[in-house]
Amino acid sequence: MEITLNHVLFLSTALFFVGVYGFLTRRNVITMLMSVELLLNSVNINFIAFNKYLYADKLDGVFFTLFLIAIAAAEAAVAIAIIINIYRNYNSIDVDDVDSLKW
Amino acid sequence: MVSMTGDFKIILIPLLPLLSFLLLGIFGRKYLRGSSGLIGTLSLLSSTLLSFSVACNYFFVSGKVNGVFQQLVVLKQTWLEFSPGVTIDMGFLVDPISVMMIVIVTFISLMVHIYSLGYMKGEERFATYYAFLSLFTFSMLGLVLSSNIFQIYIFWELVGVSSYLLIGFYFDRQSAVAAAKKAFIVTRFADLGFLIGILVLSFGAETLDFKTLIDRLTTSTPQLQSMITTSFLGVSSLTWGLLLVFAGGAGKSAMFPLHIWLPDAMEGPTPVSALIHAATMVVAGVYLVARLFPVFAISVPGALHVVGYVGALSALFAAVIACTQTDIKRVLAYSTMSQIGYMMFALGVSGYGGEHGLGYMASMFHLFTHAMFKALLFLGAGAVIHYVHSNEMVDMGGLRSKMPVTHLTFLIACLAISGIPPFAGFFSKEEILTAAFENNKLIYGVALFTSGLTAFYMFRLYFSIFWKKDFHSDHHGEGPWTMKLPLLLLGVLAVIAGFAPFSHYVTSDGKGLETAVNVSFSVAPVLFAITGILIAMQLYKSENAVPDKIAGAFGSFYTWTLHKFYIDELYLFVTKKLIFNLVGRPSAWIDRNIVDGGVNLSADLTEDTSSLIRSWQSGNLQQYAVWFFAAIIGVVVIFMLIWK
């Protein structure tokens, strides 16, 4: 069976919603960060797939993906720094405990 | 022309009181307690000497060019420039009336300063008192020397403020506070008219400078034409402007119906009353009308008639009230109002230039002599009050042997104000009556009757204080020499001031005027005055029941007069009942319910909305994320539906 664009898009959509689900349901901040990485990766897959199937003679999608990986790395660094600070202040990395920003 | 040193002197005249005000106001209470009176008096003494020298120089040496006294502006400085044509120039105006006024103001103020050394001795706020006196003198000197109508307004308000401070000097007394506020508010109310008048006149004449303004509004210029043709409610804008300016003057000069502050202003220390009544403040209104006199007389005689009738009415009205008052200072206050009325109607019946300008000259002459004898009366009354510790006539009587100096000088002043020859008041009143007789018989009649009344109430006062009954007291003496010296000096002046050849120097057009006392004309007023004196003597020289009977015979008229014709009550009725209820309360209601209501409504709406939606801010990150994704999906759905 040949793998078409639709298969790949199905995979990336599934990955995206797995990420959304994880982001909304897990209480552990690190797990939520991992879910965000899933979201980013699903977008990466989309870029690669569209590039490969629709515009095979161009490389724009590939470059965007490379950028995204770099950004994801930077984002992970910032996020982990924030998480360490959260832990220092609340002695917990459970997102339910971090709810002091409210009315 | 005035030389450089002359300019310098003129600056110093108002500047010295200002300096002493600053010095005493800032350092007086702490460091200069003992010497503050001396500092104030010495600075004013220098001012007085300077103004005498300026006056001598102006009147006898340099003022006259080709037989006409010149109007000079010295030290002219452009203060504000709106456009090349419209500027406000500050300067010192030197002309016969301003020079005459600086002499009167500094001299009377000096007398008051010396007198206060004794009168206010031991006062807790002695230094403050002298600071305020200096400020008052400075303001008045600045007012008379102002070269433009805007500058005069500044000093006009300064006079108002300093009178407020002095009338309310005993601020621990409720009545003094009320009187100070009353004086300030009433004159301020009149000043509103003055301000509008200034705006109208200066807008029409396109200048604020007195000299230019008078030139433009008395010769046929485009400005005069446009002011005459522009009209509001059927009255030309020129007339409006002058009448409004006169309203301001009437407020300061306590003309009917804006006189109500004057009797209450007696709450201030007595020397202050002397200053307010004789030389400063109340004559400011007369001075203002005199300053703009050419415009009144040449361009709008109608406005001048208003001045005349208001003056005559005030003169009569105040004289009638003065006959019934029992507080000696109040009697004097009403007599001031009456005499200022004389000055006003003298201006009102006058014309411009030459023989027609007799009223103008008479008014200024009366201002001059009145300053002497009215200051004397008040200072004498102060000495009496100092001795008796009461303002009421019933507590006095038989003081002539206890206070010989006061008695003599007070008698001189009473004779002077009654117009008995050869005392000062006779000459000036004579000129006023002559001017009135020639121009307006009605006003002449009123003035003649009033002069009889004046003599009556002044001698009622005199006999009640110094005769009537024996005064039993082993009291301290008459007062220190600082109190007697001004009395004696003023007493001498009240005798001789009338002989000054005033008409040669101060006239409406600057040219000298020959006046002579016409004996046959003088008979009537002098007879009236003597009749008044004789009646007063009959009634008040010894204690008897006749005055009460006469008062009873007048019935309700007497009661009305005793209550000053209920003018105060009328004002209270208008302000408290009518204005408060019809304007004040509705405006307060609108402010509270509609203006505030609108603001409160928007605040309430915001608050309600926020409390409704504030639970959305849970602080829970994942809840926010749900909203975020939901919104994204919503946007996506919308875009998909629109951009199919």
Image (spheres, rainbow, N blue to C red):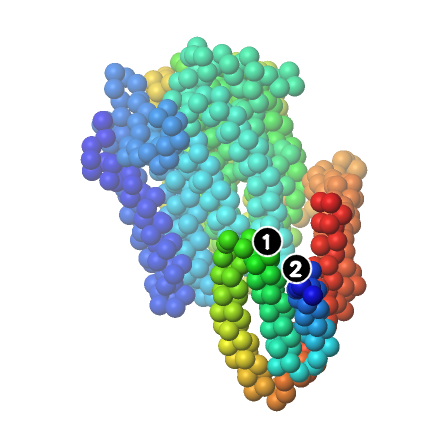
Q: Report x, y in % for residue B21.
A: 38, 54
Q: Amino acid at mark 1?
A: Leu
* Residue drawn 41% across the image and 65% down it: B29
* Residue drawn 65% across the image and 19% down it: B233
10 Å crowding of disc 1: few (<14), some (14-19), many (20+): few
- Element at badge 1? helix
Task: From this view, report whether residue B370 is shown above or below residue A21.
Answer: above
Q: What residue would you read off at disc 1? A: A54
Q: Quadrant of the N terminus of chain B?
A: top left
10 Å crowding of disc 2: few (<14), some (14-19), many (20+): some
Task: Tell which of B157 and B388 is nearer to you.
Answer: B157
Q: Amino acid at mark 2?
A: Leu
Q: Report x, y in % for residue B411.
A: 49, 42
User: Is B172 on the left-hand or right-hand side of B519?
Assistant: right
Q: What residue occupies the far bottom of the structure in this picture?
A: A91
Q: What residue would you read off at disc 2? A: A5
Q: Report x, y in % for residue B317.
A: 65, 32
Q: Chain of mark 2?
A: A
Q: Chain of mark 1?
A: A
* Residue drawn 73% across the image and 45% down it: B644
User: Is B425 on the left-hand or right-hand side of B324?
Assistant: left
Mark earlier in primary sequence (1, 2) = 2
Residue B86 sits in quarter: top left
The answer to the question of whether label 1 and label 2 lie on touching residues, with beta carbons closer than 8 A, is yes
Q: Determine the CA span between mark 1 and mark 2.
A: 9 Å
Q: Report x, y in % for residue A27.
A: 70, 81
Task: From this view, report whether residue B581 is shown above or below residue B630.
Answer: above
Residue A21 sits in quarter: bottom right
Task: From this view, report whether residue B270 is shown above or below residue A48.
Answer: above
